[in-house]
Image (cartoon, helix red, strand yellow):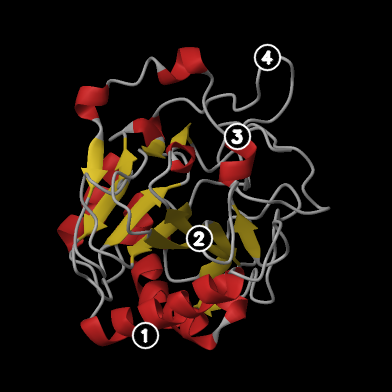
């Protein structure tokens, strides 16, 4: 569907101005959007998994742990596929977030994946400038990620930052010159980013960050000793079909969460970079950008 077609349908939970801002800028931030009771449930469930990660000694199917991780000092960089790890996470995705997604993707919405990224007061928690479309290309760019901060987030603990309007500009090569996948812009391309125009999305726990798959974004390292979890859920319009194998499918991947399946695929004529074949598995953006293989 085109933006005009999507906007022609009544909104479920967003205002029309918020929807228009998303299509104009490639992102929106919704401070304090999620109610306190749901935030508390998500926080308690997250803490449970942080404790479970203490028993891990290397990255695996559920946890991506960082260098120096120990039972006494857990460095959980990512909880993989939270939607299938606990019903609380899946309920949040298919209930609260699916309505938000439908306001921006159209009436027919597909769940693509979820993950939870952490900040750990460590330079290694920086996420470099990148775009999501090159990780999981589709036949069109009605693909978006909705983040939910589970801790109050300001400039001290590494908020998500976006480049307004970049969704309508070029897609960048996220391979290094020697051909290996880095998952971030090359240094010369990152240097083109006008940092004076970057928007840092901050807000209390329960704030939503929403960005299109073409939108360039990054996240600075945290200066706070308290971990900052960001729950991320990706959705697509039903008429956006994947070109490549899913990098980390869950039991809910490609499930219709609003509306019905599409009978026709919509093709955007703009090309997209093809990522490596991740049909054998994927770790995390932290590992890719750190060159961990």
- Direction from residue 197 to residue 246 in the image, left or right: right
Q: Position of residue 250 (x, y in %)?
A: 68, 70
| Residue at horizontal 63 percent and vertical 30 percent from the top | 182
Q: Which residue is mark 2?
A: 73
Quadrant holding the C terminus:
top right
User: From the viewer's perspective, is the residue at label 3 or at label 4 nearer?
Assistant: 3
Upstream in the sequence, badge 2 or badge 1?
Answer: 1
Upstream in the sequence, badge 3 or badge 4?
Answer: 4
- Direction from residue 144 to residue 269 in the image, left or right: right
| Residue at horizontal 62 percent and vertical 48 percent from the top | 138
Q: Residue furthest front?
A: 72
Closer to the camera, 177 or 110? 177
User: From the viewer's perspective, is the residue at label 2 or at label 1 nearer?
Assistant: 2
Q: In this rendering, does residue 261 appear at all? A: no
Q: Which residue is mark 3?
A: 290
Q: CA distance from mark 2 to mark 1?
A: 24 Å
């Amino acid at each position: 569907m085109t933006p005009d077609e999507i906007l022609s349908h009544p909104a479920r939970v967003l205002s029309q101005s918020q929807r228009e801002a998303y299509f104009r800028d490639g992102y929106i931030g919704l401070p304090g959007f999620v109610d306190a009771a749901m935030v508390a449930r998500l926080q308690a469930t997250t803490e449970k998994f942080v404790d479970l990660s203490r028993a891990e000694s290397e990255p695996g199917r559920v946890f991506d742990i960082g260098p120096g991780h120990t039972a006494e000092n857990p460095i959980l960089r990512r909880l993989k596929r939270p939607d299938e790890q606990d019903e609380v996470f899946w309920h949040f995705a298919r209930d609260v977030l699916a309505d938000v997604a439908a306001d921006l993707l159209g009436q027919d919405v597909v769940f693509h994946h979820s993950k939870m990224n952490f900040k750990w007061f460590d330079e290694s928690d920086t996420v470099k400038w990148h775009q999501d479309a090159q990780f999981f290309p589709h036949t069109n760019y009605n693909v978006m990620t909705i983040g939910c901060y589970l801790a109050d987030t300001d400039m001290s603990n590494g908020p998500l930052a976006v480049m307004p309007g970049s969704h309508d500009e070029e897609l960048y090569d996220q391979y290094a010159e020697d051909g290996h996948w880095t998952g971030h812009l090359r240094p010369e391309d990152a240097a083109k980013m006008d940092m004076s125009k970057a928007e840092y999305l901050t807000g209390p726990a329960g704030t939503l960050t929403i960005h299109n798959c073409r939108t360039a974004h990054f996240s600075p390292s945290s200066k706070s000793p308290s971990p900052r979890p960001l729950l991320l859920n990706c959705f697509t319009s039903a008429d956006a079909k994947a070109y490549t194998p899913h990098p980390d499918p869950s039991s809910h991947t490609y499930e219709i969460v609003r509306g019905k399946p599409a009978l026709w695929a919509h093709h955007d004529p703009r090309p997209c970079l093809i990522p490596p074949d991740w049909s054998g598995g994927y770790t995390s953006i932290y590992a890719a950008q750190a060159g961990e293989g």
